[in-house]
Amino acid sequence: RPSIIIIIQQQYNPVNMSQRAYLTLAYGPQKLGTLRLLVATNVVPKTAHNFLTLLQQQQRTSGDGDGYLNSTFHRIIRGFMVQGGDFDRGDGTGGRSVYGASFADENFVLGHDDRGVLAMANSGPDTNGSQFYITFRPTPHLDGRHVVFGRVDLADAESAAVLDALERVSTGRDDRPKMVVKIIDC
């Protein structure tokens, strides 16, 4: 007997975004600015905890670590998204969660309904680690496949400008930035 899964999605509502965070970025030697983030700790608490903990952990003094500081955005696709969070290898093949190698999809309540959505990157169901992405446009085809846990505060002028600048970053083969895009503070 086939089962039917119904996904109920909530539209953006500031009440759903209960904690603030930030990523200050550099492109090569140039500081791009700060992305201010709204994180949905009350909708996806486990996923939000993973992200917020990795923001706070210091790392990268010897080239490896357990957090986002000094990690890079390894993939940028204009008109789609920017992806980062692989603090192990920096190429999209590494990273891990605070719960172990990976953890299960928490829920799909929030959708990919706008520019600036913050969601977990994965390699299939229940494979969330540390990698995340931020959308450049609505991407509803990702609903039900990637856990959305926040968004960029686009009401903040600097955040909106930094997201625009990220989308314009020059990329080469495999959508990799030609110069390093790095998290220099979080």
Image (tube, helix red, strand yellow):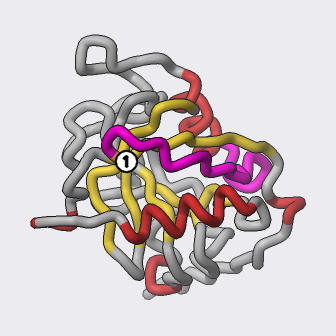
* Residue positioned 54% across, 85% down in the render: 4
Residue 6 placement: quadrant: bottom right
Quadrant in which the C terminus appears: top right
Question: Percent from the top left, x then y, of residue 176?
Answer: 21, 59
Q: Nearer the viewer, residue 102 or 142?
A: 142
Question: Percent from the top left, x then y, of residue 17?
Answer: 79, 55
SS at mark 1 in the image: strand
- Tell me if 71 is positioned left or right of 117 in this view: left
* Residue positioned 55% across, 59% down in the render: 162
- Tell me if 148 is positioned left or right of 123 in this view: right
Mark 1 neighbour density, 10 Å: few (under 14) some (14–19) many (20 or more): many
Quickly name the residue at label 1. Answer: 27
- Tell me if 14 is positioned left or right of 105 in this view: right
* Residue positioned 32% across, 13% down in the render: 61
Give, as a single range, the part of the protein colored magenta.
Answer: 28-46
Where 53 falls versus 105 (above or below)? above
Q: Amino acid at mark 1?
A: Tyr
Q: Is residue 128 magenta?
A: no
* Residue positioned 10% across, 66% down in the render: 173
Residue 101 placement: quadrant: top left
Question: Percent from the top left, x then y, of residue 50?
Answer: 55, 36
For the question of whether residue 145 can be seen, the reply is yes
Quadrant in which the N terminus appears: bottom left
Q: Residue furthest right?
A: 15
Q: Residue furthest top?
A: 62
